[in-house]
């Protein structure tokens, strides 16, 4: 039987009831999981955005309208909202929708804009209702999928920053004024790779690594990803998993201790990440790879 790809129930995301689910909230930015089960017979949704907002549409479709225009948005689109601006959403079919919604303080958007060479107009940051799905935004959408599925502040922050990059670059004609990373910046990334190798169990957050590199968070994220093909968080997780796998193969430490010493904050996150990467649980991996005692 063919799957109903438009139905939110089929999407591989955390199971949550319909509504807004706050994931992160602070002065600089916020993240919410929007689960909607409304259909064509539902009333139009109306309101006012409290802060600048970018919603990454992950499944489903609906019509969005604001003072910036009107658009039918679907998976891969970036729905935009300016601070204090009114919006109206209307469902034209059934099946619901799912989106990861980011709110931005002015300072964070301005930080991203400076790095891109794009002027951000304060409360009127966005000049269109949405940025359509495109090949150039696939990586940012995929990161939003990953952040929603597996959670974590660092994953959500990276998704928020890369989403802002897609939107601000699109408003600048799809281009930005940032040059290729300099030799100095490449060395800074190399230095951070060595730092992560030694300190992967410690604080390797985006804030910490960017500060050590002497760069803004967003600029560090961009040049790190360009040079390594991964975001800082993805690289740190891969390093921690590599350390954990080696420890499982060579010691008899309890799995919980292996998780903590590798830098994972909780056993559940470790088990999920490890199973996804190796195709088996940590305990099963150990049983398969531990050297057998000599007879």
Image (cartoon, rainbow, N blue to C red):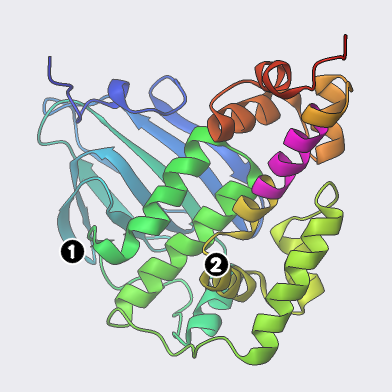
Q: Residue at x 46, y 80 (%)?
A: 120
Q: What span is colored magenta in the figure? A: 238-248
The local secondary structure at tag 2 comes to helix
Q: Residue at x 29, y 23 (%)?
A: 10
Is 116 situated above or below 17? Answer: below
Report x, y in % for residue 40.
11, 29
Residue projecting furthest to the top:
295
Q: Residues within 10 Å of mark 1 (few under 14, many from 20)?
A: few
Q: Residue 222's quadrant in the figure?
A: bottom right
Report x, y in % for residue 9.
30, 20
Q: Quadrant of the N terminus?
A: top left
Considering depth in this image, is 235 or 66 the residue closer to the camera?
A: 235
Residue 47 visible somewhere in the drawing: no
Q: Residue at x 67, y 46 (%)?
A: 237
The local secondary structure at tag 1 comes to strand
Considering depth in this image, is 73 or 140 the residue closer to the camera?
A: 140
Is 84 situated above or below 176? Answer: above
Q: Earlier in the sequence, mark 2 or mark 1?
A: 1
Residue 40 as seen in the image, left or right of residue 229: left
Mark closer to the observer (2, 1): 2
Do the CB atoms of the residues marked 2 and 1 lie less than 8 Å apart?
A: no
Residue 202 — which label? none
The residue pinned by badge 2 equals 225
Residue 219 as seen in the image, left or right of residue 226: right
Q: Residue 271's quadrant in the figure?
A: top right
Considering depth in this image, is 267 or 92 the residue closer to the camera?
A: 267
Q: Quadrant of the C terminus?
A: top right
- Chief SS of the magenta region: helix
Residue 6 as seen in the image, left or right of residue 171: left
Q: CA distance from mark 2 to mark 1?
A: 33 Å
The residue pinned by badge 1 equals 69
Q: How many marks?
A: 2
């Amino acid at each position: 039987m063919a799957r109903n790809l438009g139905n939110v129930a089929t999407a591989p995301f955390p199971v949550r009831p319909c509504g807004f689910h706050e994931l992160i909230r602070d002065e600089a930015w916020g993240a919410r999981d929007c689960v909607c089960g409304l259909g064509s017979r539902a009333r139009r949704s109306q309101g006012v955005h409290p802060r600048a907002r970018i919603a990454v549409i992950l499944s489903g479709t609906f019509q969005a309208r604001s003072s910036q225009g009107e658009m039918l948005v679907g998976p891969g689109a970036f729905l935009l909202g300016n601070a204090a601006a009114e919006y109206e959403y209307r469902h034209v079919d059934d099946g619901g929708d799912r989106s990861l919604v980011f709110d931005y303080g002015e300072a964070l958007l301005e930080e991203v804009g400076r790095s891109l060479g794009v002027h951000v107009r304060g409360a009127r940051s966005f000049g269109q209702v949405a940025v359509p799905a495109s090949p150039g935004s696939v990586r940012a959408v995929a990161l939003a999928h990953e952040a929603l599925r597996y959670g974590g502040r660092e994953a959500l922050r990276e998704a928020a920053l890369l989403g802002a990059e897609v939107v601000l670059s699109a408003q600048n004609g799809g281009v930005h004024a940032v040059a290729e990373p300099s030799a100095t910046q490449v060395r800074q990334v190399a230095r951070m790779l060595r730092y992560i190798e030694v300190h992967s169990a410690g604080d390797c957050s985006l804030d910490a690594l960017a500060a050590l590199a002497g760069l803004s968070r967003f600029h560090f994220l961009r040049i790190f990803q360009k040079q390594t093909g991964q975001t800082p968080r993805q690289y740190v997780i891969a390093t921690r998993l590599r350390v954990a796998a080696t420890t499982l193969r060579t010691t008899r430490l309890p799995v919980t201790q292996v998780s903590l010493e590798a830098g994972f904050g909780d056993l559940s996150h470790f088990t999920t990440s490890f199973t996804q990467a190796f195709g088996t649980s940590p305990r099963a991996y150990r049983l398969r790879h531990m050297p057998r005692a000599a007879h």
